[in-house]
Amino acid sequence: MPGSAGSRLTRYGLRLAALGYVAVLLLAPLALVVWNTFQDGFGAAWEAVTAPAALHALGLTILITMIAVPLNTIFGVTAALILVRRRVPGRPVVSALIDLPLALSPVVVGLAILLVWGRNGWFGPTAESLGVQVIFAVPGMVLATVFICLPFVVREVVPVLREIGTEQEEAAATLGAGPAQTLWRITLPAIRWGIVYGVVLTTARALGEYGAVRVVSGGIAGRTETLTLHVEERFQAFDHVAAYGSSVVLAILALLVVLLMNVLNRKGGGHGHHGL
């Protein structure tokens, strides 16, 4: 029929336009980065990404991610339980504060941490007297990453908690289970996929964080330089092979996170949850 043929053409046209849009914005730049990485051969690219500064930057990025993700997971689950299962005064304000990192520029976040923990900040002199260096050191970079990634676990877990309701938890309490038993045996298994999605999103964000970390780290090669900062430093030094090679490493890490997200999404039934 003419009508069905027209709708089929419209569908194909929309799909082609969407694929073209993705190709122009994502695939073409990514292909260009890969091309520039290996234009001098695999050996040059491998030497660049295995240089001591690059390996240190990669290790520091993974270390910060391994610290930030568990902290945000604990905070996210706790905050979600409080928001959904407790009566919190000013709940919209609390939810807005949790979402604040999504609205603020990462550079502003880094500047705020610098003002609070710097030498002349609120807590800077106390930390310095205790022999703890926060700014231009790993603790400040962890703080920046934790704050930037704060909302993701909460945003994934809150809708799941609302969806499952309280019937099973109330039944467990009626049968004599304590709060810890109910949490461990009833609540956490019920919200596990929300936690997993939040952890994956937090990991992806932590691996690619730049703005806030750039402000508080100082970008000292071999000390406080993450992989994203290493890309910038190598590019400004006109070492394009190293800059593009490190970008490919970041892209591979991001791709692994996306693939993990898709695998978990299938296992979890394909239901993502977003929003507070």
Image (tube, helix red, strand yellow):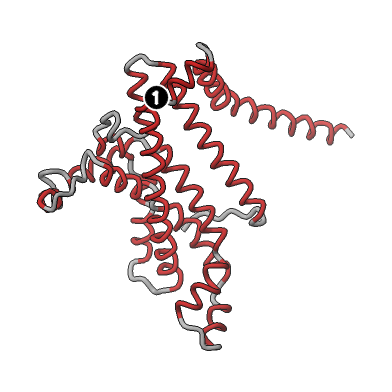
Label 1: how many Cα within 10 Å (few below 14, some 14–19, many 20+): few
The residue sitting at 54% across, 74% down in the picture is 185
Q: Residue at x 50, y 20 (%)?
A: 33
Q: Residue 25's quadrant in the figure?
A: top right
Mark 1, secondary structure of its residue: loop
Residue closest to the eye, 174 or 16: 174
Total marks shown come to 1
Comparing 70 with 115, the one in front is 70
Q: Is residue 113 depicted above or below 17 in this figure? A: below
Residue 170 located left or right of residue 73: right
State the image coordinates of residue 92 (x, y, percent, origin top left).
38, 62
Q: Is residue 16 above or below residue 63?
A: above
Q: Position of residue 177 (x, y in %)?
A: 51, 84
The percent position of residue 30, horizontal first and vertical second, equals 54, 24
Residue 55 or residue 240, whichever sits in front: 55
Determine which residue is flagged by label 1: 51
